[in-house]
Amino acid sequence: MAAAITTSSTTIEGQVLEVAREMQVAESALEDVNNVAIDIDVEGLVATISVTIPLVLSGTGGSVSFAADTYLPDA
């Protein structure tokens, strides 16, 4: 499991970008894994973030829940 990070941005949008970047850095320790893509449109001043993460499915009695599964190494 990757270690928790501390963000420095004062907005949630900035924090999302920081977390995505830290996920990319953690992925660099893995071979053949590219689950985080950050595309920056400099002209449009827009960032597009795509994240694919494994899920764990659980539930009982007709109730279903999903949770993110671990795939990143300790940072």
Image (spheres, rainbow, N blue to C red):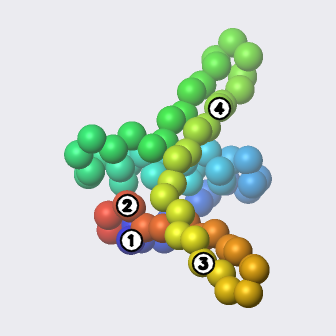
Judge by depth and name the residue closer to the eye, 39 or 33. 33
Q: CA distance from mark 3 to mark 4?
A: 30 Å
Q: CA distance from mark 2 to mark 1?
A: 6 Å
Q: Which residue is mark 3?
A: 58
Q: Give yes or no for contact between labels 1 and 3 (Cβ–Cβ under 8 Å).
A: no
The residue drawn where x is 75% and y is 80% is: 62
Q: Which mark is residue 1?
A: 1
Residue 22: in sight, yes or no? no
Q: Give yes or no for contact between labels 2 and 1 (Cβ–Cβ under 8 Å).
A: yes
Q: Between tags 1 and 3, which lies in front?
A: 3
Q: Which residue is mark 4?
A: 48
Q: Residue furthest top?
A: 43
Which callout, 3 or 2, points at the residue further toward the start of the chain? 3
Q: Secondary structure at mark 2?
A: loop
Q: Which residue is mark 2?
A: 72
Tell me which amino acid carries mark 1.
Answer: Met
Which callout, 3 or 4, points at the residue further toward the start of the chain? 4
Judge by depth and name the residue closer to the eye, 75 or 56. 56
Position of 5 relative to 48 (above/below) = below
Position of 36 relative to 6 (above/below) = above
Which callout, 4 or 2, points at the residue further toward the start of the chain? 4
Quarter of the image with the C terminus in it: bottom left
Q: CA distance from mark 1 to mark 3?
A: 20 Å
Q: Secondary structure at mark 4?
A: strand
Tell me which amino acid carries mark 3.
Answer: Ser
Q: Which class describes the residues within 10 Å of circle 4: few (<14), some (14-19), or many (20+)?
A: few
Q: Which class describes the residues within 10 Å of circle 1: few (<14), some (14-19), or many (20+)?
A: few
Q: Residue furthest front?
A: 61
